[in-house]
Image: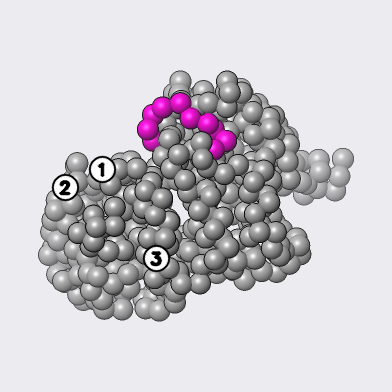
Amino acid sequence: MSSFAPMIQDDARCISGYVIGKTLGSGMSAKVKLGTHIETGKQVALKLIDRSKLTPRQSDMLEREIQAMEIIQHPNTLKLSHVDWTTKYPKKRGGFRDVVLLVLELSTGGELFDYLMYTGPLEEVVARSYFRQLLSALEVCHSQGVYHRDLKPENLLLDGNFQLKLADFGLAAINCDDHLCSTECGTRSYMAPEVMSRKSYDGAKADIWSAGVVLFIMLAGNPPFQQAGGNDWWFTAIRNSRHDKFWMAHLRSAPNFPKLAQELLNTIFVANSDSRTTLDALWQHPWLQGTVLQPDELTAAMEQKRLTVQRTKERELAAAKAKKAREKARAGATRGGTYDPFGQQVMRGGPKPLVAKPSGMTYFYSHADPEVALKCLAQVFSDLKAGSVTVTDEDFKVKATLPRETGPLTVVARVLSVEEEDELLVLDFERRNGDKLEFVKFVQTEIAGLLKDIVEDGTGISDGNTAPFTKESPGLGELEEPITQDAAEDVF
């Protein structure tokens, strides 16, 4: 036994030979915890799925995820080292919960999404390095009959040396006849047009389309289109083989988008999957033959970005803890008698104005009266035709669910006060359900525009037409309408 075992505290909670550490992430029915092997001290990610909350569909997805990860062995795919379908998770306050345990490779670098969200588009050589790693992983997946079908930056993890790890195979298709799949699945803004058409499609070609969307975002900092279907202007340009118009619009916000990368994406963004490029052809493209970073160079290039992401996430965590403390204090005050809810909602150590770089901002400052601010929030959601709007006056809170092209988006908005600033409010927005990218775009464009009469300059929005992300303030921003509707009709 190694020297690690004697260091285990007597009250440590353990499962399947691992000491349970801090929470790394959580979802509707699963948590990911840091795990440390009792004998070797090796750290891993423990994915714990509550068996009592598993629906039949979720069970199928879990089985598919495990099967796919057991099939694929590649340096750029997340490694699964152990599965236990029936084990007991020791709860902090005693007792046990029945869980499914997946022991996964630890990716201390986090999600690629966070880097794009908080530090903006990547340098060309970094984007090329990661795209080659992604294609390498896909090549092995497809050779083994595995089609991921949910490629997006949230599912691209980075290890301690910032090497890419393709993860989350819950929507993967395995051993499809003639490579054809039939289920519409994934995230709509990354879906290939044939996937959205609900007809049989080639899983490999669908993955290539989604990989192209990821590459575009890595280089531009915003998505190429809202979705590959319907009346989306940018996709209409693609569908009509007007790549020149597509790039003319995008180059206004991303003028330095590499020309060779544009040419490569023109072979990926082809509406007819039969005419879309293949992995073999992509490897031969001149852009992919350019310089790539060696592992130590990639580490050096990403380390400063990691520090930026880490600091931002620490601020968000501090804000979340402060919010929880306020709710606890509010509950205690309620039990004690007379309660002034607004007086209790104090943002201790909360966010500071980010005038120059409002990336990731989901709050605004206001000097409006608290009751007026609450009514404005409720009216905003009503104007946006939310399916359900719940106003809790005593908590100064509004909860609403809105229909979006990427699926339902549930948002909670709160009116908070700021410590030592009696007349200053914070209008804080939190995503409860729905696509991350859609949520950020929603708050920074639609919400910001509708609240412009009560929010302060210096909170990232000065007028309803201000683009939330620029070259100076990077992030996954909103697509700007390239031309008027009449002009668009003239083009097509």
Report the front residue among 310 and 476: 476
Q: Position of residue 457 (x, y in %)?
A: 26, 78
Report the front residue among 230 and 361: 230
Report the front residue among 41 and 268: 268
Identify residue for label 3.
248
Q: Work out how far the residue at label 2 is from the one at label 3, CA to CA, in angstroms.
A: 33 Å
Q: Residue at x 44, y 77 (%)?
A: 472
* Residue 385: assigned label: 2
Residue 78 visible at all: no
Identify residue for label 1.
403
Task: Determine whether 19 is above or below 246 in the image.
Answer: above
Q: Which residues are magenta?
A: 196-205
Left/right of residue 114 with respect to residue 234 in the rendered view: right
Q: Who comes first in sequence, dot 2 or dot 1?
A: 2
Q: Secondary structure at mark 1?
A: loop
Left/right of residue 279 with respect to residue 250 in the rendered view: right
Residue 7 visible at all: yes
Q: Residues within 10 Å of mark 3 (few under 14, many from 20)?
A: few
Task: Determine whether 414 is above or below 209 in the image.
Answer: below
Q: Amino acid at mark 2?
A: Lys
Q: Work out how far the residue at label 2 is from the one at label 1, CA to CA, in angstroms.
A: 8 Å
Q: Quadrant of residue 73?
A: top right
Q: Is residue 193 magenta?
A: no
Q: Secondary structure at mark 3?
A: helix
Q: Residue at x 36, y 53 (%)?
A: 237
Q: Secondary structure at mark 2?
A: loop
Q: Who comes first in sequence, dot 2 or dot 3?
A: 3
Q: Residues within 10 Å of mark 2 (few under 14, many from 20)?
A: some
Pointers 2 and 1 in contact (C-beta within 8 Å): yes
**How did the renderer colour the structure?**
one colour
